[in-house]
Image (tube, grey):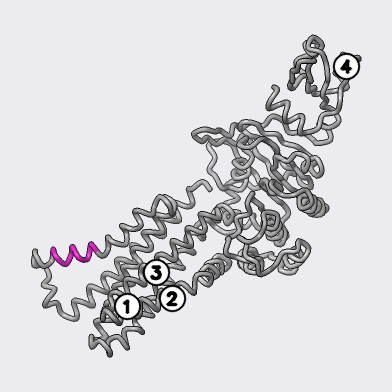
Amino acid sequence: MENAIVVRDVTKRYKEFTLDHVSFQVPQGSIVGFVGENGAGKSTTIRAILDLIRLEDGEVEVFGLSKKEREDPAWKEQVGVVFDGGHIPQYMNAVETGRMMKGIYRQWDQEAYEGYLKRFHLSGKKKYKDFSRGMKMKLSLAAALSHHASLLVLDECTSGLDPIVRDEILDIFLEFIQEENHSILISSHIISDLEKVADYIVFIHEGRICFEEEKDYLLENYGIAHVAKEQAGRLPKSLVCGQRNSHFGCDVLVRDRREAKRLEPEMVIDPASIEEIMLYMVKYH
Amino acid sequence: MKGLLYKEAVMLKTTMRMQLLSLAIFVAMGFALKNIVYLGMMLTVLCGNFCLNSLNYDVADSWNRYASTFPIRREQLVSVKFVLEYLLIAGSVLFTLLFGIPFSLVVGVPYEECAATCVACGAVSLLAGSLNLLLCTKFGVEKARVIVTLTYLLPFGGIMLLYYCSEKLGIINLKNVTEGQVYLMVGGLVAVIAALSLLFWRMSCRVLRKQDL
């Protein structure tokens, strides 16, 4: 399978934060959920992918193009980007935003844009600053989807939105991915959204990638064992990802719940959600 | 570039009412003070302010970060500000040149003198504006604000200094300066400033190309 994005050993040092040899890939035709707590390095990684920051080490390939081959910005015709907060000029309305984009993207599809405005119930005359957060994100998304991009890069685009708007937006992503060469990289800390749409999950913590797995693999294999402390000690360390102790015993996140069950048949092991996997790895590791 | 220029045009349209009001006040003051330099200088400030306002909005919206995801070169983001600056200054010079006609008739100053003053003001505006764009690109609008104020004062201070030095040192006797010398000085000033402005534009492009957004 070809990759839309390949991130290889990307390193960027700031005074108080380091993006440390981050590597993962976004296979073509898939949705990759990029998860991690606030400040874990999601946005920095996305900025690295979009050539917005200079790297100290490592490399990024987008559509198989190296950094040098991406010097010609034409490749960005194929990429739609939505940042947290939008970043469309506050004083512009949706109609003006469309006209501006038409002057920027050669493949701009005004009809598609107007279709999205209608679908999202966005007023053409209302200024961007007067839109609600949900409306702002919808307008940014309409702009990102109206130039026939084959890759969407979305940075926290669903955060702060109500569940109905989020669900609408997730539906759009699922529609977009119907085309086999379309791919999405979506960063979020709203894990439930990613559980709905993502094919792969990349988890970043303190600037390092903790895992890159198929979502279904995570949901099928990881589990939370509810055990007494002495039982937890009997589990092999290679199987344990995190442990939460309480007065009554402890909950252990295991990598392979079937293997754990085989080793300790009396254990009660529930399937783990991605949110729980992330929580145990960060907080109870 | 077309889309970026359109964005600036929308910004200009948004603030048009205030700009026109300011212009009307400056024209009235120019007549009242019988001083075309006043109008030229104030238009200089108006053009510069507009470009800084536009930059300020861009910073508030994190526009450069967003626009760097478009299929355009980063240099175009700063180039569009320079193009805007040049267009506004050209418009201001044209306006003051036209304003000079009734002004010279009413006040009784020779039109050639008015025209030379207008062009000189435009040149100073070009220098200050281009330098400001470079400083704001390098340091950001907030940090550059103090230095930007100085850049408006420096060209005028420099001219005054030149005047007093010339008087004291006697290199040029400005009281008996010929018409030809005035045109030569204004022409030279415009050429030097145009070259400096191009240099500042190149430097701004370089700064933005290396910036983390």
Q: Give the range drawn in magenta.
A: B157-165
The residue singled out by tag 1 in the image is: B29
| Separation of marks 3 and 1 at Cα, in angstroms | 15 Å
Residue drawn at x 15%, y 79% as measured from the top left: B178
Residue drawn at x 41%, y 74% as measured from the top left: B22
Quadrant position of residue B20: bottom left
**In the image, are marks 3 and 2 on the same chain?**
yes
Residue drawn at x 38%, y 54% as measured from the top left: B145
| Separation of marks 2 and 4 at Cα, in angstroms | 79 Å
The residue singled out by tag 4 in the image is: A267
Q: Spot the residue most to the front.
A: A247
SS class, disc 2: helix
SS class, disc 4: loop
Task: Rate crowding at label 1 as few (under 14), some (14 to 19) or many (20 or more) other CA atoms within 10 Å.
Answer: some
The N terminus of chain A sits in image quarter: top right
The amino acid marked with disc number 3 is Leu
| Separation of marks 4 and 3 at Cα, in angstroms | 76 Å
Query: Magenta: predominant secondary structure element?
Result: helix
Please say if A44 is above or below B131: above
**In the image, are marks 2 and 4 on the same chain?**
no
Residue drawn at x 66%, y 69% as measured from the top left: A125
Cβ–Cβ below 8 Å for labels 3 and 1? no
The residue singled out by tag 3 in the image is: B46
Q: Which of marks 3 and 2 is nearer the N terminus?
A: 2
Determine which of the numbered discs, if any, sits on residue B21 in the image. 2
| Separation of marks 3 and 2 at Cα, in angstroms | 11 Å
Quadrant position of residue A77: bottom right
Please say if A10 is above or below B58: above
- Does the magenta-highlighted stretch encompass residue B163? yes
Where's residue B4, x and y in %? 55, 65
| Separation of marks 1 and 4 at Cα, in angstroms | 88 Å
- Does the magenta-highlighted stretch encompass residue A56? no
